[in-house]
Image: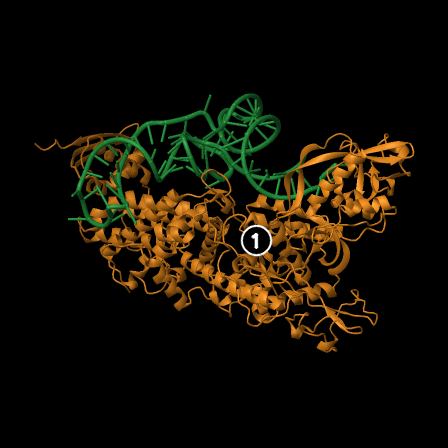
Chain colours: A orange, B green
Amino acid sequence: MPAIPERPTLDGIEARWAERWEADGVYRFDRTAQRGSVFSIDTPPPTVSGSIHMGTVFGYTQTDSLARYRRMAGRDVFYPIGWDDNGLATERRVQNFYGVRCDPSQPFDADFTPPFRGDAPSGKGSGHQEIPISRPNFVTLCHELTATDEAVFEELFRRLGLSFDWTLQYATIDDVSRRTSQLAFLHNLQRGEAYSAEAPTVWDVDDRTAVAQAEIEDRERPGAYHLLAFHGPDGDVLIDTTRPELLVSCVAMVAHPDDERYAPLAGSTVRTPIFGVEVPVVTHPLAQPDKGTGIAMVCTFGDTTDVTWWRELDLPTRSVIGRDGRFAAATPPWLADDAARAAYGALAGLTVKQAQSAMVEQLRASGDLRGDPRPITHPVKFYERGSRPLEIVTSRQWYIRNGGRDQDRRDAFLTRGKELDWFPDHMRHRYDHWVEGLNGDWLVSRQRFFGVPIPLWYPVGDDGAIDHDHPMVPDASTLPIDPSAEAPPGYTPDQRGRPGGFIGDPDVMDTWATSSLTPQIAARWVDEPNLFARVFPMDLRPQGPEIIRTWLFSTVVRSHYEHDALPWANTTINGWILDPDRKKMSKSKGNVVTPMALFDQYGTDAVRYWAISARPGVDTAFSEDQMKVGRRLATKLLNVTKFVLGLVGGADGDTVGGADGDGQGEADSDAVDPVDLAMLARLDATITEATTAFESFDYARALERTEAFFWWFCDDYVELVKGRAYGGRGHGPAASARHALRQAIEVLQRLLAPTLPYATEESWSWSHDGSVHAARWPQPVGTVAPALDLDVVSEVLGRVRRVKTEAKVSQRATVTRLAVQGTPTQVAAIDAARADLADALTISTLVVVDGPDLALDVELSPPAG
RNA sequence: GGGCGCAUAGCUCAGCUGGCAGAGCGCUUCCCUUACAAGGAAGAUGUCGGGGGUUCGAGUCCCUCUGCGCCCACCA
C-alpha cells in the first residue's frame, strides 16, 4: 500500500494505473459466469480509418461509466472492443496514404513498394497520379495501415481508462469476423433471406460500386428546368426536365391519371426531339400535376421514380450511362435514323455534366429547347462520402430482405424496435421512421476489394455463360474463404473461368453486413458456443444517433433472422458534440482538438468528467471549462482523502460501509454524534439516488447527485467536525467524527469511481490493497437520521462566513458572541451542532433562543490595534 | 413536405412524480487558514422564448406561435 503523498497530484497517474489494471486483469471477463450475473455490452467498433474525434471520447466514456457501475454492482461485465477496419473508408485512406489505386487486372508484384507513406502531398489540385496495383498488393497495404491506426486507437482508449477486456479484441476484417460474416450470410441464403438480382442499382461513379439506401443522402444542388418540346400528331407536348442529357434514354411520358390536360394524349405516342424515338404517353399516380408542366419524361434511369415507373408500367430499358459515369461509346441500337445516330455521336464518351452541355446546344439549335433554362435548387442524391451525384445503372447484386419490399417482415422489425428499451426513449422514433420508410431490400454486395468476400462460386456453362441462379456454397468448416483464390468443392483451380468450370463471386460485402454481427463476432458465436450462450442476447448497445438506421437496424435484422431474438435488451443513444458556436463539430471547420492534448493538459479524469456531466442523448457543447471543473473535483478528492486518512490512519482493516465483503452492521456502530449521523443519513440518500440513476443508465444524474453531496461534505461537514476530529473535545466525540469521515470518504470514492477512475483509484490505494474498481458498489447502511436539520446548520455557517467576509476579516477571526434565534426545529439543530459550530466558526459565546424565524446577531472581536 | 428534439443568469447547463428559480464558468470582494493557492470564503446577475389554457399554485401539464438543431422525403 503506497504512502499518502505529501502533495497529492493527478499528473502522471494514468500510465501507472492503466498498466496496473491490465497486469491485474481487473476488467477481465469471467468465462465461467452464468448468464444471470452477466452484463454484456456490444460496443460498436470504431472506424479506424480516420482521426480520433472528441465525439468518440464523449460517447465511449459515458458507456464506460455504465460498465464500471455494473461491474461494481456485482455483475460479470462482458465488455469487448473491436475495430471496424474493412470497407471503403479504409480503401480511401490507403489510396491517399500510399498514392495507389486497386486495379484487379494488375498482376501481383511481390516486391511492390508504395511511392510514399504518409498523407498525400497536401493542397488542392496537387493531383498526383495514383499507381494502379493488384488486389493482393492493395489488401496488404490495407492491413498494414489499419494495424497502425488500431494501435493509435488502442493507446488512446487505454489512456482514457475505458475498462474493456482487451483479451476480447477483434477487427471486422479478421478471421473470426470473416468466418462469422460468411456463415451468417450462408444461413441467410439457405433460409431465403438473401438473394441476388439483376436490377437498376444506385451507383457511385467515382468509387464504382453500388451503394445502399442507408448510405445515400440528399444534397441541395443548383440545377435548371429545361422546357423541351416533344412532337405529337396533334402538336407539341412540353415537358420540364433538369436532366436534358437523358433525352436519349427516354422511354415514355407520364401524367397523372386525373390530369384532364393530358387525358386526351394517354395511350398515344409522341416523338422525342433530336432522336425522334416514338414513346408512349402513359399515366401513373406518382406523376405530379403541379410539378413542371405536369407531364414528365421517363428515362432509364434519371431517378428512383423512373425506376418505379419503369417497373410498374413495364417500360423498356434504354440505358446509356456506364459504370464510369460516362455515356457509352457505342451508338444505342434504338436510334433508327442517321440524324439521331449523329446526334448521339456528339455525346458518346462524355461525362454526364459534359453531355448535358452538348445536349442543350443541340436542343437550342433545333429549337426544341423553349426559352432559356430556369435555374432552380433541388435535392440531388449523393453517396454520403461521395462528391458526384449518384447514377442508376443495371447490375447484378446481392440483397438481404429487410422489410423494404415485404410488409410482414417490416412489421416484424417494427415489433423488434418496440421490444427494445431506448435511452432516451424518444430515439425510438428514428428507428420507426426509418423502417417505415424503407423502399427496397438491403443491398449488401460491393464492387470493392478490402472487405469480406461473398463466399460463393457460380458454375460456368459449356457455352461459357455464368449461371447466377445456382451458386455453389463452401462447407461451413472451411470458412472463411476467398472465392477468387480458392476453388469450390469438386473443382480444381485450373477450371476457373473455363467452360464447364466455375467462377468466384468477385464482390465483397458491405461493411454493415459484417458489423451488423458484432454481438456474434465479439461473443464468438461460431467458435465458442459456450461463451456465446453466457452473454447473448446482450444487455446493452451504446451508440450514436446517426447510426440507428444503419448499424442498429441491421444488427436487429441479422439477430432476428439468426436467433429469432433482439441482439440486446437496451440501447443508449448519445448526443452530438457541438463546438462553442453550437454547430456540430467537424474536421472541415478546423475546430477539432485532439483528445491526447486534453488528457495531458487537464488529466484524463477531467475530460471524462466533461463527458459524464452531459445528459444522456443530449447534444453537448465542447467545454474546456467543464474539464477544469472536473480537474478541481478530482484534485479535491485526493486532498480530502489525504486529510481524512491523516486523521484515521490508512489500515485496510478499518474498512467500513461494506466496501469488502458484506460489512453489514458494523458500519455506523462508532458514529454516535447526531451531526455525524445526519451526514451519514444524507450519504445513504445519495447512494440510493446514484444507484437508481445508474440502473436507468443515467450516469449524469448519478454524478450530479454524488457531486452535490461531495461539495457539501467538503465545504460544510468536514469544516464543521474538523476540530472535533482532531480530538479537541476528547476521544469519544473524535472517534465518532473520524469514523463517519472514513465511512463517507470510502463511499464517495466508490460513487465517483465510474466517472474518475484514476483519482478514485489513486486515493483508494492509500488505504486498500485491491482496486476500487473491483470493490463493491456502496449500499445504504440504514443510518437513522436524527431530528437534526443539517441545512439549518449550513445556513448558520454561511451567514457567519458572510459577516466575516463583509467585515473583511479572516475566516479564522473570533466571533465574540453569536446569538441565534429560530423556530424549535432550527433551535434543536443548532443546539445539536453547538460545539461543532463554535469550533468551525471560532465562536466564544453561542446563545440560542426561540423565535419566529432564523435570525443571527454576530459580534466580531474588535480589530486589533 | 413529414417527424423528433431544444429554448431557464453574460456563457455552458441542472431543475426527475406541479410547491420559496439553482450549479459551474466568467465577473466583483475578501482570506497565504495546519487536506487543498491549479486553493478557500462570500457577492451581484432572471419577462424560465411569445401568447392562451388547466390548477389553490405552472420553469414543470395541455394548446398555439416563433426561433434553432437533427433525422427522413419521388432529382420532372
Q: As drawn, is A330 to the left or to the right of A584?
A: right
Q: Position of residue A661 (x, y in %)?
A: 38, 63
Q: Chain of mark 1?
A: A
The answer to which image quadrant residue A285 occupies is top right
Could you tell me the amino acid type at mark 1? Answer: Asn
The residue nearer to you, when weighing A118 against A826, is A118
The residue nearer to you, when weighing A219 against A730, is A219
Q: Position of residue B56 (x, y in %)?
A: 50, 24
Q: Is residue A375 above or below residue A198?
A: above
Q: How many C-alpha atoms fall within 10 Å of the one at disc 1: few (<14), some, or many (≥20)?
A: many
Q: Which residue is mark 1?
A: A570
Helix, strand or loop at mark 1: strand
Q: Is residue A300 visible?
A: no
Give me the residue at 68% from left, 68% from top.
Answer: A455
As drawn, the residue found furthest toward the left would be A865
Quadrant of the rendering where the C terminus of chain A is positioned: top left
Q: Position of residue A393 (x, y in %)?
A: 74, 52
The residue nearer to you, when weighing A80 against A233, is A233
